[in-house]
Amino acid sequence: MRKRIFTRVTVIVIVLLAAVMRTAAGNRPEDAPFGAAPPPAWVATYLEAMIGTWIADNRPHRSEDEPFDAYGIEWKWGVGKKSIVGRLFAMRDGKEVGTVWDFREFWHPGDGQLIASQFGSDGTYGVGPHARKADGTMEMLQTFYAPDGGVRRIGHRSELKPGEMVSRSFDVQSDGTWKARRVYSFRRKPD
């Protein structure tokens, strides 16, 4: 009887030890399914440059459905200065009237890319990569998921200049072509 219990305990210990060793071996960085990539230097430069408040004139697009004179984007650091957290807010008569979108941009080490995600006041969620092009401009391609089940893709191409960010938005068609929507010139507010 003692021999049988000893054998069972020995087998259980060996099985547990083998499982622990397999798990530990599978958690090595070289065994990760996608690997991990540190952010390139441009990511830190871009994130740092965005911190602050930016205002864009909306008067050319103002309508009964969109009665705002301007839009503002406010960016702050996320935890550890490894991401930025922002919001897009609407303005009328020089005063803020409400937040329309919440944003977060972060380096995804598993995918090896900068990710832009946003959450709309109507429950819409958008997510996609934000990449730096060879000419220094930025390009973002996001998929938006609406609460009613609708899905659409929107692209942004932006150019960051001292004190100004020019942002062009596009509807991305099912065949991959980009159809121009709007252009905004966001100006950084002095601190």
Image: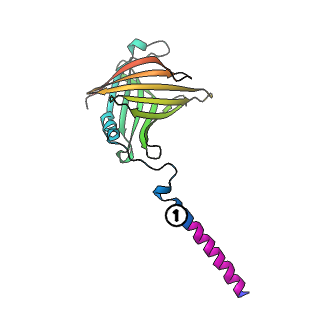
Compared with residue 89, is residue 40 higher up or lower down, i.e. above or below?
Answer: below
Q: Quadrant of residue 84?
A: top left
Q: Position of residue 157 (x, y in %)?
A: 40, 25
Q: Quadrant of residue 134?
A: top left
Q: Is residue 82 left or right of residue 66?
A: left
| Type of secondary structure dominating the magenta stretch | helix
Amino acid type, mark 1: Ala
Q: How is the image coloured?
A: rainbow
Q: According to the image, label 1 marks what residue?
A: 24
Residue 189, magenta (yes or no)? no
Residue 89 picture location, percent across and down: 41, 27
User: Label 1: few (<14), some or many (≥20) within 10 Å?
Assistant: few
Residue 162: quadrant of the picture: top left
Q: Is residue 19 magenta?
A: yes
Highlighted range, magenta: 3-20
Instruction: Please report the residue visible at 67 percent of the width from the left and 83 percent of the height from the top.
Output: 6
Could you tell me residue 57's position as x and y percent? 36, 18
**Between residues 120 and 105, which one lies in front from this camera angle?**
105
Q: Secondary structure at mark 1?
A: helix
Residue beneath the point at 58% across and 29% down: 146
Q: Is residue 154 above or below residue 79?
A: above
**Residue 124 appears in view:** no
Q: Position of residue 151 (x, y in %)?
A: 58, 27
